[in-house]
Image: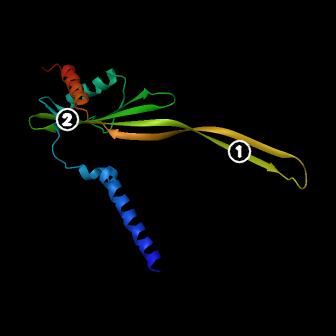
Amino acid sequence: MKLSAGIGATRGIAAAAIVSLLAACGGGPAHRGESFEPDPRYKRVFKMPAIQVCEAARLVLLGQGYVVRSLDANALSLDGSKQFAGEKQAHSVLQVVVNCVPQSQGTSLFVTAVEESFDIKKSSESTALGLPMVAPITVSRSSTAEHQVKSGGQTVGEERFFESFFAAVQAELGVR
């Protein structure tokens, strides 16, 4: 009796150790690292009207092949997306969201970007129908289907990406 209780306790301790080890390796929720501290990568201030700044951002995205749509009636929020071919049957989609917020000294331009990856997965399906006891006839059918499966996604954080976007908006506005 004492031996089996000792084994159960040892297994419980081992399981707790494994869970702790996995948590220490970054297995926890991603939002725990969120501090809501100002991050200059995602914001620039332009001394121009919001509609003009957002139009420049829209032209920059269109000039790079993005499909752009307005997210509000005033065209102060934009969503641009572009697909990139990957290896074999994989592809990525880069979505850029732009918000122009009027301020007393001009416009704050906020930009975020999310890159999502997709793969094509094949699945096979077969069906057989027959009555071996009544008739020796069997009807079978098989098919292969392809499905797009999201394999990953992440917010873009590279400073160079945002610097080049803001520089392009600045050039489109003709501001030096």
Query: Residue 111 versus residue 119: which sits nearer the camera?
Result: 119
Residue at 47% in and 80% down: 1
- Identify the image quadrant of the C terminus: top left
Q: What's the residue at 45%, 31% (across, down)?
A: 91
Q: Secondary structure at mark 2?
A: helix
Of label 1 and label 2, which has the lower sequence position?
Answer: 2
User: 44 left or right of 123?
Assistant: left
State the residue lying farthest toward the bottom. 1
Is there a contact, CB below 8 Å, between mark 1 and mark 2?
Answer: no
Residue 41 numbered mark, or none: 2
Q: How is the image coloured?
A: rainbow
**Vertical position of residue 137 compared to residue 57: above or below:** below
Q: Quadrant of residue 71?
A: top left
| Residue 136 percent coordinates (x, y) | 89, 48
Q: Residues within 10 Å of mark 1 (few under 14, many from 20)?
A: few
- Can you tell which of label 1 and label 2 is closer to the viewer? 1
Q: Nearer the viewer, residue 159 or 111?
A: 159
Query: Left or right of 102: which side holds 92?
Result: right
Q: Which residue is mark 1?
A: 126
Q: Amino acid at mark 1?
A: Ser
Of the numbered discs in the image, which one, if any, rests on residue 64? none
Q: Label 1 vs label 2: CA separation?
A: 52 Å
Outermost residue, left direction? Answer: 105
Q: Residue 40, located in which quarter of the rendered image?
A: top left
Q: Amino acid at mark 2?
A: Arg
| Residue 39 point in image, percent of width and height | 17, 40
Relative height, residue 26 to residue 109 (above, below)? below
Q: Secondary structure at mark 1?
A: strand
Observer able to see residue 69: no
